[in-house]
């Protein structure tokens, strides 16, 4: 529930300070420029060239950035972004999962660089405020930023037309469509015509987590979204996620999140109803 562990902004100076410690399951984005001279009006490199590095969970972008560059970026978790459906597929899987060319930066034209830098600046200023809607505003800026990056990726020709051809992509597509119906690795493996063990090992190799963890994570992500967006009660969330046994879902929620359903709701309500706070 703490934003510090689910969202953050960071910068790299030309002297390359120690890399920030990032949560292993976060997505990372870094807009860099060369260590050469900067145009004083814009802060861009003199030739206007910048590069965009994208990193997915367990494969952060920072290690791929050459030494001696400047840049600013952010990290965020799946839970913080709170994306679902087609938007989640486009802004997380197609944008960040590029196994053929991991961490290959995208060239950023000057006008797009200015747009991305402005969005990062807005987020930096908003992140300093302590308001009820702080996270919602940051989340809105983040979506806009990711759409700009997705557009840049498509224009540069780096978008993967066959995003669902690999086993990971096909598994993710099935998971997004069926997580409220299928809860076991075996059900997905059967549809993908592989053994459950092969599926789990293959997914772990590419993402650092077995298939079963992805299934649980997607279910819990949707549960949090339902609580946050609609303040849905336990029974409604359980049924909407395909659990007929509410008690079983309650136990799973506590095992995956480390807190009870009611405690999670109370913490969320306290976060958005803190007294004396005004939206900036």
Image: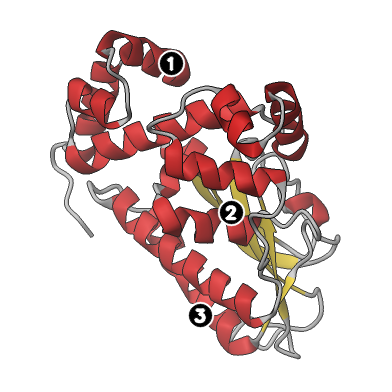
Secondary structure beneath dot 3 equals helix
For marks 1 and 2 on the same chain, the one whose residue lies earlier in the sequence: 2
The residue that mark 2 highlights is: 93
Image x and y of residue 265, in percent: 24, 26
Please give left or right for residue 139 compared with residue 215 in the image. left
The residue mark sitting in front, 1 or 3, is 1
Q: Which of marks 1 and 2 is in front?
A: 2
| Sooner in the amino-acid sequence: mark 3 or mark 2 | 2
Determine if residue 40 is in view: no
**Residue visible at 32% across and 30% down?**
241
Determine whether 139 is above or below 203 in the image: below
Q: Nearer the viewer, residue 179 or 66?
A: 179
Q: Distance between the residues labelled 1 and 2?
A: 27 Å
3D distance between C-alphas at marks 3 and 2: 23 Å
Q: Judge left or right: residue 122 versus residue 44.
A: left
Q: Which mark is residue 274?
A: none
Q: Earlier in the sequence, mark 1 or mark 3?
A: 3
In this rendering, is residue 168 above or below 12?
above
> Which quadrant of the view contains residue 211?
top right
Which quadrant does the C terminus fall into?
A: bottom left
Residue indicated by mark 3: 115
Q: What element carries label 2?
A: helix
> Where is residue 82 drawn, in percent x and y?
39, 47
- Where residue 3 sits in the image (x, y, percent)? 42, 40
Residue 57, picture quadrant: top right
CA–CA distance between discs 1 and 3? 39 Å
């Amino acid at each position: 529930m703490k934003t510090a562990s689910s969202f953050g902004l960071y910068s790299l100076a030309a002297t390359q300070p120690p890399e920030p410690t990032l949560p292993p399951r976060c997505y990372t984005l870094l807009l860099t420029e060369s260590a050469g001279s900067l145009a004083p009006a814009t802060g861009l490199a003199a030739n206007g060239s910048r590069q965009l590095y994208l990193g997915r969970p367990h494969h952060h972008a920072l290690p791929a950035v050459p030494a001696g560059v400047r840049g600013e970026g952010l990290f965020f978790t799946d839970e913080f972004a709170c994306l679902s459906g087609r938007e989640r597929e486009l802004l997380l899987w197609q944008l960040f999962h590029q196994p053929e060319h991991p961490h290959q930066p995208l060239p950023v034209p000057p006008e797009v660089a200015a747009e991305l830098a402005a969005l990062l600046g807005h987020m930096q200023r908003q992140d300093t405020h302590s308001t009820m809607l702080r996270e919602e505003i940051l989340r809105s800026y983040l979506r806009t930023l990711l759409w700009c990056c997705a557009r840049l990726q498509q224009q540069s020709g780096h978008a993967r037309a066959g995003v669902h051809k690999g086993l990971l992509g096909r598994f993710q597509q099935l998971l997004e469509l069926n997580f409220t119906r299928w809860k076991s690795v075996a059900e997905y493996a059967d549809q993908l015509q592989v053994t459950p063990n092969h599926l789990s090992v293959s997914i772990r190799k590419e993402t650092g987590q077995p298939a079963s963890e992805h299934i649980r994570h997607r279910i819990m992500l949707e549960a949090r979204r339902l609580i946050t967006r609609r303040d849905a009660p336990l029974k409604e969330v359980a049924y909407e996620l395909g659990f007929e046994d509410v008690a079983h879902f309650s136990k799973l929620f506590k095992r995956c999140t480390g807190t009870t359903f009611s405690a999670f709701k109370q913490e969320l309500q306290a976060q958005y109803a803190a007294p004396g706070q005004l939206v900036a």
